[in-house]
Image: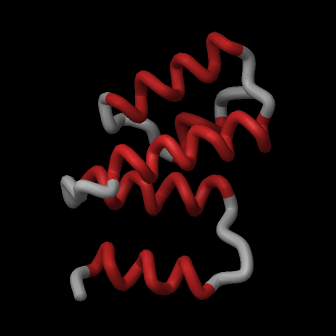
């Protein structure tokens, strides 16, 4: 099992994964060029939309950054 597989297994065992931690997992998938990246990013975007209630502009910016694999928890923290 690779690092990303181990991290995913640990995350599944946690009762709850914060939005920022979930984003870190998405980024790890992106860094490892995992085929799971797009699906993980879409799931994260659904959580971001429902938990953060971003404006359309903020949501579009975050979506672009995920698509370009540039978004991290620090850059998202400035959005609100």
Image position of 24 (left or right of 69): right
> Toward the viewer: 77 or 63?
63
Q: Is residue 14 above or below residue 17?
A: below
The percent position of residue 68, horizontal first and vertical second, equals 31, 29
> Toward the viewer: 5 or 65?
5
Q: Where is the N terminus found, in terms of image quarters?
A: bottom left
Image position of 50 (left or right of 1): right
The percent position of residue 65, horizontal first and vertical second, equals 41, 28
Q: Is residue 75 above or below residue 9?
A: above
Residue that appears at 78% across and 43% down: 51
Q: Where is the C terminus found, in terms of image quarters?
A: top right
Total marks drawn? 0
The percent position of residue 27, horizontal first and vertical second, equals 38, 52
Q: Is residue 48 above or below residue 34?
A: above
Image position of 46 (left or right of 35): right
Which scheme is used to colour this image of the protein? secondary structure
The percent position of residue 78, horizontal first and vertical second, equals 65, 31
Residue that appears at 22% across and 82% down: 2
> Toward the viewer: 6 or 70?
6
Image position of 22 (left or right of 41): right
Residue that appears at 49% across and 41% down: 42
Residue that appears at 36% across and 44% down: 38
């Amino acid at each position: 099992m690779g690092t990303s597989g181990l991290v995913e297994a640990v995350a599944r065992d946690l009762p709850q994964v914060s939005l920022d931690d979930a984003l870190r997992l998405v980024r790890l998938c992106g860094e490892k060029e995992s085929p799971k990246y797009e699906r993980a990013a879409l799931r994260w975007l659904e959580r971001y939309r429902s938990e953060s209630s971003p404006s359309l502009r903020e949501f579009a910016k975050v979506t672009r950054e995920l698509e370009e694999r540039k978004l991290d928890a620090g850059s998202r923290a400035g959005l609100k």
